[in-house]
Image (cartoon, rainbow, N blue to C red):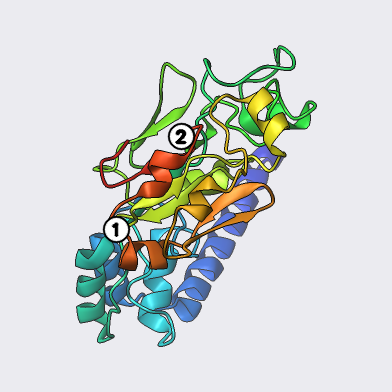
């Protein structure tokens, strides 16, 4: 037998040997998959949003099936319906979770917000923030490059013509992926039962905030003084609403009427 043929025979023999060894090892050490994990994963919405705290739907399915301490209601997009199905499959109790949606805490649109410079870099909010905080004069406002829109797995956000993202409450699952993607931290998850909410994130003092954005909260305290339930306080020059108190006691949103810059929105009428 000549040398080339011998080399081929040896290589084939070595490959076959190691292939057999790997096959036997795989059979010996293979872990049986729990079919219940697949059943749970099948009913999850497959958004891979990570709102449950796990790296995707499969990992959550594995955890909720195998770990008795992992609750069945962590799938935020699935809401109560999915929680009940997961609970039934795993024999766990699903606590009721309050539905929420993404709320943009900024009204610094193209008309109201001033610019301090022209940003011509990568159209990305995080990248713009690295370059002197972006082009807007208000360092707390929306940068308008749509990182939140790109992060939404459920197509619940779109960039409006005014330079601010818009949330479709009918599509929003409250998973929080958009909030995590925002380097300005201007997206909050708000209860559908919330009555009023501040639509600004500026912590600048009144004169500076007003100079940078016509729609900014100026921390004047009129909302606080006109709330008979002490549901509003001023923290770092910015109004902050206690949603629980407001929801329980408020009948008329006088704070909205008294705000000189309309920085507080009446969520009941979706203004």
- x then y, percent, for residue 204: 71, 39
What is the total number of numbered labels drawn onto the structure image?
Answer: 2
Q: Is residue 61 left or right of residue 210?
A: left
- In this orientation, does residue 139 appear? no
- x then y, percent, for residue 43: 23, 62
Q: Is residue 40 left or right of residue 102?
A: left
Residue for badge 2: 262
- In this orientation, does residue 11 appear? yes
Q: Residue at x 67, y 38 (%)?
A: 4
Where is 89 relative to 209, above or below? Answer: below
In terms of image quadrants, where is residue 219? Answer: top right
Q: Nearer the viewer, residue 4 or 165?
A: 165
Classify mark 2: residues with Cα within 10 Å, few (<14), some (14-19) or many (20+): some
- x then y, percent, for residue 216: 57, 33
Q: Residue at x 37, y 69 (%)?
A: 61
**Quarter of the image with the N terminus in it:** top right
**Quarter of the image with the C terminus in it:** top left
Which mark's residue is nearer the viewer, 1 or 2?
2
Where is 199 relative to 10, above or below? Answer: above
Q: Residue 193 has which mark?
A: 1
Q: Nearer the viewer, residue 40 or 177?
A: 177
Query: Could you tell me which secondary element the residue under label 1 belongs to?
Result: loop
Q: Residue at x 27, y 69 (%)?
A: 40
In terms of image quadrants, where is residue 264? Answer: top left
Where is 150 relative to 59, above or below? Answer: above
- x then y, percent, for residue 126: 66, 34
* C-alpha span from label 1 to label 2: 20 Å
* Sequence order check, earlier mark of 1 and 2: 1
């Amino acid at each position: 037998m000549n040398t080339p043929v011998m080399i081929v025979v040896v290589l084939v023999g070595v490959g076959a040997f190691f292939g057999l060894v790997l096959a036997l090892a795989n059979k010996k050490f293979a872990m049986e998959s729990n079919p219940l994990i697949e059943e749970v994963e099948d009913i999850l919405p497959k958004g891979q949003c990570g709102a449950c705290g796990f790296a995707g739907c499969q990992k959550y399915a594995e955890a909720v099936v195998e770990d008795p301490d992992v609750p069945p209601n962590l799938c935020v997009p699935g809401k109560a319906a999915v929680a009940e199905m997961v609970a039934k499959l795993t024999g766990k109790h699903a606590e009721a979770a309050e539905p929420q949606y993404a709320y943009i805490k900024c009204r610094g649109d193209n008309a109201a917000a001033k610019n301090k410079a022209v940003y011509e870099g990568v159209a990305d909010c995080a990248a713009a923030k690295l370059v002197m905080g972006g082009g807007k004069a208000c360092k707390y406002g929306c940068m308008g490059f749509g990182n939140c829109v790109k992060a939404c797995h459920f197509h619940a956000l779109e960039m409006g013509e005014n330079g601010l993202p818009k949330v479709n409450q009918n599509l929003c699952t409250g998973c929080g992926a958009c909030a995590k993607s925002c380097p300005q931290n201007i997206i909050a998850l708000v209860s559908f039962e919330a009555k009023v909410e501040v639509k600004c994130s500026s912590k600048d003092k009144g004169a500076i905030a007003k100079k940078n954005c016509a729609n900014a909260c100026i921390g004047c305290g009129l909302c606080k003084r006109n709330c008979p339930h002490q549901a509003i306080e001023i923290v770092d020059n910015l109004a902050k609403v206690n949603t629980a108190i407001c929801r329980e006691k408020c009948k008329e949103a006088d704070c909205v009427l008294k705000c000189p810059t309309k920085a507080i929105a009446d969520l009941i009428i979706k203004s």
